[in-house]
Image (cartoon, rainbow, N blue to C red):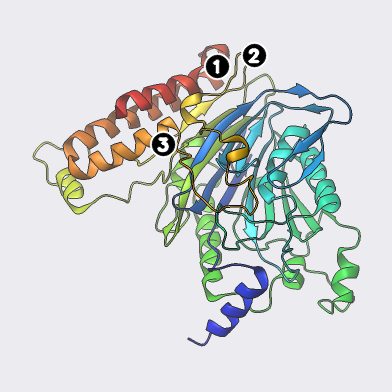
Amino acid sequence: MGSAPAESDFLRKTGMAEPPMSCDCFVSLPPGSRDDHVIFGKNSDRPRDEVQEVAYYPAVSHPPGSMLECTYIQIPQGEQTHAVVLSKPAWMWGAEMGANDQGVCIGNEAVWTREAVSPGEALLGMDLVRLGLERGDSAWGALTVITSLLEQHGQGGPCREDPEPFSYHNTFLLVDRNEAWVLETAGRLWVAQKVTEGVKNISNQLTIGAEVSAEHPEMRSVAQAQGWWDGEGEFNFSQVFSPENPPARMELAKQRYRGGTELLQQHDGSVTAEVMISILRDKPSGICMDSGGFCTTGSMVSVLPRDSSLPCIHFFTATPDPSREFLSLPFFLSCFLSVNPPDPNPIPDRSIFKPFVFSDSSTSVLGVVSPQFGPDDPVRKQPRFQSQVDRRHELYKAHQVALSTMETNPDEGLAIYEILRDLESQCLSDISAMLNGEIPGEELGDLFFDSVDTEIKFYQ
């Protein structure tokens, strides 16, 4: 009870109607990885009923002077944009996470700092994720894109499809075949830390202390002018910019951060795509979220080989909650009390990971792309978010039906998910064989389409 006034005051200052819950990002660089690969992973934790689509956009050359319509504001378009694949809330222009054809991956996290959240509309953190991928040819290149746009246009605006206020600042994990960067922001200010080896994770808190690799030129002077730093001694960004009285439930982010760190450290030196997937499926740590109005609505894991002759592989779920810990009691008992259980670990995964590989024939897979509503979209109309539309894509709808089947007909549901789990395992095996030179990479260009199509058919 003693923390309630501080929490209420914090929510008022940050424009939030409820305490924050959000995402986790991970990276493993050699020697943290088992192989000579950089492994990236993210769970996107969003409002429970929000649909996340997986969309591909090809590389494009744009006419000089073109303008770009982001979620809320227009900005000048770049002359050339890279091909990207994005896992994104279907209502917004930006993305929670994604990759480009240059081998760059980015994910973002919500954070709250001493800097006030702007009440006006600007670039969302998710817009900055997409812009970094479309315009950056390396992790550092994407970081400079994001920080430049942040300084020019600022960040702000509603971060969910709801008239109730919910806005935040952002941290980012940017990764390529060689290195990773953690970028943390407070308004238009920012600080970055370079990571070249081992394992690293970020959650909904500031983590960069005194080990700063790059920063906004006015960051320290602003902190000193605000009385947050005396200008003497060591400058510790997280200590200086973290809010003085954060809500009690922000402690959950610290617990998830510690849990993620522990899971990475357990596998330090042996991280693979399978290990990263298992971390994203971990419910006891809270990394796979299912709490109140929020849950994990989409997940992504990427394998970036250091050998540039090998393709990068990007796994997406396009459906919520990849965990196994969701079963009703009848389903649970049917799995474990069966006379002839199907295997020693029969609990199925709620969502499976499907691999995407950039190729000359890459295109959007319509089964995981949500319907479009043009100028009639409630996001586009003023005032915004006054009505709801059905943004579910084909896989999302089929997945919902399958979950219902698992509750009402456990045997049938289990049979479906055993097949899909085998599909995921086979995809992982094929990817491993390709990276080891046993299967030509060109043969995997349609694997994402085939995986989505197969999943939908099995649900039906």
Looking at the image, residue 14 sits to the left or right of residue 42; the answer is: right
Q: Quadrant of the C terminus?
A: top left
* Nearest the eye: 13 or 420: 13
What kind of element bears circle 2?
Answer: loop
Residue that badge 3 annotates: 396
Query: Which of the pair 112/174 is nearer the observer?
Result: 112
Q: Which residue is mark 1?
A: 445
Circle 3 — which element?
A: helix
Q: Residue at x 8, y 40 (%)?
A: 339
Q: Amino acid at mark 2?
A: Asp
Q: Give the total of numbered labels.
A: 3
Tell me if 226 is positioned left or right of 100 in this view. Answer: right
3D distance between C-alphas at marks 1 and 3: 23 Å
Residue 360: which disc? 2
Judge whether 289 appears above or below 54 on screen. below
Q: Earlier in the sequence, mark 2 or mark 3?
A: 2
Q: Is residue 224 left or right of residue 60?
A: right
Q: Kindly tell me whether residue 432 is visible in this rendering.
A: no
Q: Secondary structure at mark 1?
A: loop
Residue 168 percent location from the top left of the image? 66, 60
Separation of residues labelled 2 and 1 (CA atoms): 8 Å
- C-beta proximity under 8 Å, tags 2 and 1: yes
| Tag 1: amino acid | Gly
Q: Earlier in the sequence, mark 2 or mark 1?
A: 2
Q: Which label number is shown at residue 326?
A: none
